Every structure is written in structure tokens, then in C-alpha cells.
């Protein structure tokens, strides 16, 4: 049975550094035997969280987003059906891109009670920086906090920039292959 790996991408571009790292992750995951599906959030017309009610809405009581028909439900289901995730984003202002941030905001809320689609799911985190290379740590820290809140298990983190991308892409590919082949957090090599 092949592992299903979902690549959740906050990258608005179809070329460039961030996409080349995503391609390395996909190649590695396929080499490790996984069936890989990339979700480009930019391809959807997703809303932000509307902070329903006095701060909580159906997300807390019934584990769904009131505005989920904008593509959110569909993506959440794909994430639920995946065995493991890759979350990848360019660094914007030391954070994830706004499309990824607003999607994760909603996903985290729907995972707060009841069905937790991310609990115990292994995740590979990838942040790629541009000009200055600044903000990689704060971006990954933001993603780490999301994982902590949802119970997702971080398999590895990658901070990629213009001058380390050659060897980081090699490592990303190997990490995705290891994830796809069933390596678990805590395994000793
Ligand atoms: C709005 C915006 C904000 C950005 N903020 C940062 C930043 O804080 N630090 C940084 O190193 N790069 C920053 N960048 C550059 C992107 O991280 C960079 O485009 C990407 O990671 C890698 O290059 P790519 O566009 O070829 O994929 C920013 C880019 C944009 C469009």
C-alpha cells in the first residue's frame, strides 16, 4: 500500500527557488514510493477566517468552517486522506505567505475539537527565503506553532535560501523519501 503524501503549497509562483524545493520534495516522496498530490493554495479563491460569533463559530462546536464551500472543505478532506504532509512556503515578512497563513488559521480552528485531521500526522516543513535570507526561523516557528496546536508531528524542518539551495534540495529530497518509505519520528538509524 503506497503512502499518500499531500504537498500543501503557499507558493504563488510556478517557478523560482521555492518551487524548485517543492519539486525536490515531490521527487523524493515519489522515489520513496508515495503517491504525491500538490495543492497550490493560490489556485483557489479562499476566504480568510471571519472570526464568527464572539470569536468562535461552527469550527469549535461542529468542527467545520461556515465558509468552507470556497474550497476549504475540499482541501481539508485531501489533507485528511493523506498519510503525511509537506507544508512549503516562501518567507514573506518573516512569516508564511498570506494565503498559507489564512488557510492554516481556519484549519487549526476546525481541528480544535472533535475530528482532528492533523493529529499524529507527520509533516515536513519547508520555508524558502529570498533576497536577505532573513525570517526563515520566524516563519518555521509559526509553522511549528501550528503543528503544536493541531497535534501534527514535525518530521523535519528546512530553511532554504539562495546560497544553500543546492545542498538543502538534496536533503529535502532525501527527507521526503525517508518520510514516504515509512520512517517514523523516534526511529533510530
Ligand atoms: C511580499 C514579500 C515579502 C518577502 N519577505 C521576505 C523576507 O522577509 N525575507 C526574505 O528573505 N525574503 C522575503 N521575500 C522573498 C521571498 O521569500 C522569495 O521570493 C522566495 O522565498 C524565494 O524565491 P522565489 O520567489 O524564486 O521562489 C519576500 C517576498 C515577497 C513577495
Image: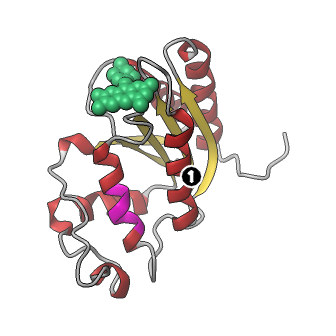
Q: How far across and how far down the image is residue 58, in percent? A: 28, 83
Q: Which element is circle 1 on?
A: helix
Magenta-colored segment: predominant secondary structure: helix
Residue occupying the point 58% across, 62% down? 148
Residue occupying the point 23% across, 84% down? 53
- Is 134 rendered above or below residue 40? above
- Is 186 rendered above or below residue 125? below
Q: How far across and how far down the image is residue 32, in percent? A: 59, 35
Per the rendered image, the range of residues in magenta is 103-108
How many discs mark residues in the rendered view? 1
Out of 180 and 17, give the one closest to the viewer.
17
From the image, tell me which residue sits under label 1. Answer: 144
- Is 83 rendered above or below residue 68? above
Side of 146 relative to 41 (left or right): right
* Residue 152 in view (yes/no): yes
Residue occupying the point 54% across, 11% down? 163
Side of 31 relative to 69 (left or right): right
Quarter of the image with the C terminus is top right
* Residue 23 in view (yes/no): no
Give residue 39's quadrant in the image: top left
- Is 187 rendered above or below residue 14? below
Q: How far across and how far down the image is residue 135, in percent? A: 50, 33
Amino acid at each position: 500500500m503506497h503512502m499518500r503524501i499531500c504537498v500543501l503549497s503557499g507558493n504563488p509562483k510556478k517557478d523560482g527557488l521555492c518551487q524548485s524545493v517543492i519539486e525536490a520534495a515531490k521527487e523524493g516522496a515519489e522515489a520513496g514510493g508515495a503517491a504525491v498530490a500538490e495543492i497550490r493554495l493560490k489556485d483557489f479563491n479562499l476566504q480568510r477566517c471571519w472570526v464568527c460569533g464572539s470569536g468562535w463559530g461552527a469550527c469549535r462546536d461542529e468542527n467545520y468552517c461556515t465558509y468552507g464551500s470556497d474550497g476549504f472543505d475540499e482541501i481539508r478532506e485531501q489533507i485528511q486522506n493523506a498519510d503525511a504532509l509537506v507544508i512549503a512556503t516562501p518567507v514573506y515578512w518573516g512569516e508564511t505567505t498570506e494565503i498559507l497563513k489564512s488557510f492554516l488559521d481556519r484549519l487549526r480552528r476546525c481541528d480544535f475539537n472533535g475530528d482532528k485531521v492533523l493529529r499524529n500526522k507527520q509533516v515536513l516543513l519547508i520555508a524558502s527565503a529570498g533576497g536577505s535570507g532573513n525570517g526563515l526561523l520566524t516563519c518555521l516557528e509559526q509553522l511549528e506553532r501550528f503543528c503544536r496546536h493541531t497535534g501534527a508531528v514535525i518530521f523535519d524542518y528546512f530553511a532554504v535560501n539562495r546560497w544553500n539551495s543546492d545542498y538543502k534540495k538534496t536533503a529535502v529530497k532525501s527527507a521526503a523519501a525517508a518520510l514516504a518509505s515509512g520512517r517514523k519520528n523516534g526511529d533510530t538509524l
